[in-house]
Image (cartoon, helix red, strand yellow):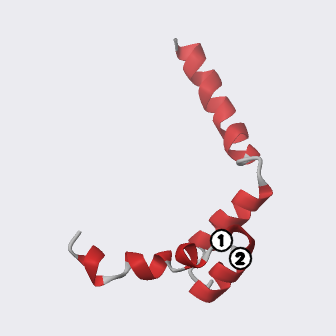
Amino acid sequence: MKLVMVLMLAALPLYCYAGSGCAYLEDVINETIDSSVSVEQYKNSLEEYIPDDATSKAQVIYNSPWCALF
């Protein structure tokens, strides 16, 4: 059992180093985490993935008074 645990701990850094395998997803995650990226920059970088106006206004809906109660 100890051997299995040692092998798992040895493989963990390799697994974490590999990343998600998708460069686009990694970029989105990095921009989401980065506090220096403004909301407009963030939305512009995701422009090709936002299909309609309702999706682009999701942040407005989230911060609305109707959601404040929850």
**Relative depth, front residue between 5 and 38:** 38
Residue at the spot x=64%, y=22% of the render?
Answer: 7
Disc 1 residue crowd, few under 14, some 14–19, many 20+, Cα 10 Å: few
Q: In this view, does 70 lie above or below 66?
A: above
**Relative depth, front residue between 34 and 46:** 46
Question: Are dots 2 and 1 in contact, CB under 8 Å?
Answer: yes
Q: Is residue 13 above or below residue 7?
A: below
Q: Is residue 12 above or below residue 5?
A: below
Is 69 on the left or on the right of 22, as rendered? left
Residue at disc 2, secondary structure: helix
Total marks shown come to 2
Q: Which amino acid does label 2 sit on?
A: Glu
Q: Name the residue under label 2.
A: 47
Q: Mark 1 points at which residue?
A: 50
Is 35 on the left or on the right of 65, as rendered? right
User: x%, y% of residue 59?
Assistant: 47, 78
Label 2 to label 1: alpha-carbon separation: 5 Å
Is 52 on the left or on the right of 57, as rendered? right
User: x%, y% of residue 65?
Assistant: 27, 83
**Relative depth, front residue between 61 and 54:** 54
User: x%, y% of residue 3?
Assistant: 59, 15
Rendered image: mark on residue 42? none
Q: In which quadrant of the rendered view does residue 15 lie?
A: top right
Residue at the spot x=72%, y=65% of the render?
Answer: 27
Residue at disc 1, secondary structure: loop
Q: In which quarter of the image is the C terminus?
A: bottom left
Q: What residue type is labelled 1?
A: Ile
